[in-house]
Amino acid sequence: MNETISIVKVGIADFNIVQAPNTIRTSGLGSCVGVVLFDSNSKFAGMAHVMLPTSTMAKETKTNIAKYADTAIPALIQVLLDKGVKKYAMKAKIAGGAQMFQFSSSSDMMRIGPRNVEAVKEQLKKVRIPLISEDCGGNSGRTIEFHPRTGVLEIRTVNKGVSHI
């Protein structure tokens, strides 16, 4: 019997969930961070494509909660809880957070990638979800795809090939 597998795509400043055998993917991670929360028992996984560290940076009147680390992670957790995933069973993997451009200024505002990674880690610590692996930093873009059945995060990095964490 053939099994049909769908790939759920997550856009920029977006999040979604999937259950095995389906997989979930996001492309175009530069300074953004891809956050994967998963439960290896239920085979559910959620992915957020976080653009910025904190919603206090929001200038729009209606905040896109998937855009910021401090709002995307709690919202993604809630969606997984609504599907019956137990919070104590959730684990996290992250990738991205590159420094895509070099600036002559050493201003902290220009360090978006590293600040995104720090904000994501801070949120995960705050909600007590263990970060079990990461592929962050550098100056190359990434595409990531998570396989809930195996718990493997495939990372395709520009000019560096494919790795698995």
Image (tube, rainbow, N blue to C red):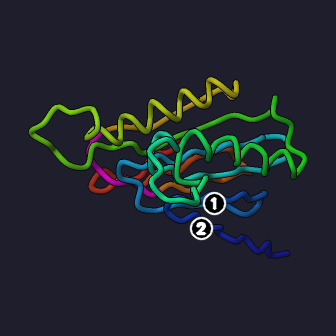
Q: Amino acid at mark 2?
A: Lys
Q: Which residue is mark 1?
A: 24
**Label 2 element class:** strand
Q: Is residue 96 magenta?
A: no
**Label 1 element class:** strand
In percent of width and height, residue 11 lies at 53, 65
Identify the mark nearer the N-term, 2 or 1: 2
| Along the line of sight, the residue nearer the viewer: 22 or 45 | 45
Q: Amino acid at mark 1?
A: Ile
Assess whether mark 1 and mark 2 are in contact (beta carbons under 8 angstroms).
Answer: yes
Above or below for 18 versus 153: below
In percent of width and height, residue 28 lies at 41, 61
Q: Residue at x 27, y 55 (%)?
A: 159
Report the predominant secondary structure element of the magenta stretch: loop
| Along the line of sight, the residue nearer the viewer: 141 or 77 | 77
Q: CA distance from mark 2 to mark 1?
A: 6 Å
Residue 9 badge = 2
98 relative to 33 in the view: left or right: left
Residue bounds of the magenta highlight:
138-143
In percent of width and height, residue 103 lies at 14, 42
Above or below for 113 versus 122: below
Q: Residue at x 81, y 34 (%)?
A: 87
